[in-house]
Amino acid sequence: MSEQRYFPNMAFLMAFLRAVSVLFLSVCCLPAKAQQSPPALKTVHAITQYDRDTWTRNEGLPSNSILTLRQTSDGYIWFGTFDGLVRFGGIDFTVFSKALTEGVKNNGMWCIVESNATAAAGSAQTLWIGTNGGGLMRYENGAFTTFGVKEGLPSDVVLSACMSADGTLWIGTRKGLCTMKNGVLSAPGKESGFPTTPINTILSDKQSRLWIGSGQGLFLMQDGKCVPAFQGDALADSLAKSPIKTLFEDKSGTLWIGTLGKGLFASRSGRLEQITTAQGLADNRVQALAEDAAGTLWIGTSGGLTRKRANASINAAFDNYTKKDGLTDNQVWSLMTDREGSLWIGTYRGGLLRLKNRKFLTYTTQEGLVDDYTYSVHETVRGDLWIATAEGVSRFAGGTFTNFTKANGLPDNMVRSVTSSPDGTVWIGTYQGLCRFKDGKFTVFATAQGLPENRVRALFLSPDGVLWIGTNGGFARMEGDKITAVEDEKGILRGTSIIGIARGKGGSLLLSTEGKGWCRFAGGRIEEHLTVKQGLASDVVMHSYEDADGAVWIATNAGFHRWKNGILSALTLKDGLQSESVYNILEDERGMMWMGGNDGIQLVAKQDLNAAADAKKTFSARLFGRWDGMESSQVSAPSLSCKTKSGMFWIPTLRGIVGIEPTKVQYNTMLPPVKIERLTTERDTANVYAPIAFAAGTQRFTIEYTALSYLAPSRVQFRVKLDGIDADWR
């Protein structure tokens, strides 16, 4: 006997099936509990230090004009464009347009308002969308209903909307204002003083006052009448003659008024102040406003994006971000901050841009580095950073880069290593010899002065003042101006490419070679030598590091090892590494190991690595990469990272240097809402917003679900179990 099963609503379907029991797991987010407030965008760095993501028609947007932005209470982000309404869940765009969706009568979408954003869970979500000629649309339970001139709108072009505290929907059209309450539209009479020009923006503030921005200035509702705002203020006349484009009230209660031509006005305690390009705005045509969790005000103008730092005076210095800095279009038409702390920027022609915090600092040629392909970072006694790159060497001091190339006296632009002496002398290893930089002058030492080979790969200054030099064709030491080739009695170092030199116990040197494995060199001889014969994954060793316990961690181009008490242990993906490609190693004060490699930077507790090496216990490693703000996930190989006196780590990559404050890395601890988006059978697609029935004979169904996290959606993972089908979690 066939059976038909009915499900009265989506919540009951989920309870009945337990079909999508989903746990959120992000490689860089293992939360103990949900975060109560979003992280703030950092303001201590330049805007170019935020991580940037862009979406255009190439990524699936129907239009590159983003007119309005809104994150609704269920976690989705909605965009209004000139070619349809868009819902975004982090991966895919769902487009609602005249050609695709019943009930949509015009593709231009000017505004989006949610009427019950604070309603109880499980209640119907209602969105109101103002269109560019198709009237006012209501989106509820997956369906659209349209209200137009026939239903009482002054115009079918709806530019703005606002839900007031009493539940009234205020609607701004091209021909004036109207309201909707309990499903009934009504237009206030002219005798009430309402402007009949375009109503560009409406705001209900914390005191339940209604502000109306029109083409004829700013108005305020008082005792049921609409009156010009700020009458009697010295700037009132200027404001009254300005088309008002956007209104915003920040957390402090300041009212911000964006005009089309006269800049930005601010009202605190009823007194107006004006901000224009003279004070630092990118342009006097202000299109959009938003505030992040730190209280930073973001201002979208027709000439770019402007940032006003929190807790600064209204006329404080502003930071601008334009096309020359990476903005896709200078005309910023919409702004929004989401619950995870990111800033979303809608442009007129350049699509959608998202700025989010990077976990790390990244310096590239955009900030002044001589080249993006970096090999080595070194800190001098003065605290300056020197960076070796493929096109010269850079000095970073006082927030500024100074670059040196062949034009400045270097023998070659390929620089692989840098170190310095206590007296401030800087030693630079190039592919045309060793270069000394002292008192502003370069002195070159090459094979004629005793180098085994001119391609200098590694440098190390020992405490006794000896400079050790690794070249592509041998090992050398330098005292004063004298360079002496170094060999060992077994001939291991003769003609060998030395690509890494590190400090070992008892003043020994740990040598990484390109083809002859790993060595410990002390007292003029090789004390320890490891190759593939002893168990190394490869004889090409990228880096080694000896910790305080005497364990040597050895990174090859094919695997990662621990050498301790005469035992060599391999650590692999099966043990918990995210990648076996490790190129350099740093340890922080907490005993956490930061390991840069081909796939990013791994973070693992050293005690977990030791436990795995001793007893093959598995561990968890975090992997950081482009999704965390690195310009490139690939760390340079071989390369030398730097731990500064302040505890900062600097790691060279293929796209600049990455700066890490190990104890201050922010993680996303906000649990994302899980959504079932579609339920399909072999016969039909169910409406997940309405009662669901499986027809008799239905054998298969497919459930499509998502988690609404936008910081790194590709890193979100799920565990799923379907009761009655799955024995264990998948």
Image (cartoon, rainbow, N blue to C red):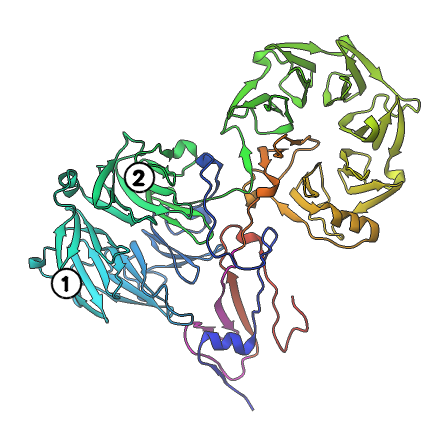
Q: Is residue 696 visible?
A: yes
The numbered dot on residue 41 is none
Q: Is residue 513 visible?
A: no
Q: CA distance from mark 2 to mark 1?
A: 32 Å
Q: Position of residue 416 (x, y in %)?
A: 67, 24
Q: Position of residue 424 (x, y in %)?
A: 64, 16
Q: Residue at x 37, y 34 (%)?
A: 320
SS assignment at label 1: loop
Q: Is residue 384 above or below residue 694?
A: above
Residue at the spot of label 2: 301
SS assignment at label 2: strand
The amino acid on which the numbered mark 2 sits, given as a three-letter code, is Thr
State which tag comes first along the sequence, 2 or 1.
1
Q: Position of residue 384 (x, y in %)?
A: 59, 23
Q: Residue at x 54, y 70 (%)?
A: 702
Residue at the spot of label 1: 187
The amino acid on which the numbered mark 1 sits, given as a three-letter code, is Ala
Residue range highlighted in magenta: 670-698
Q: Quadrant of residue 362?
A: top right
Q: Residues within 10 Å of mark 1 (few under 14, many from 20)?
A: some
Q: Residues within 10 Å of mark 2 (few under 14, many from 20)?
A: many
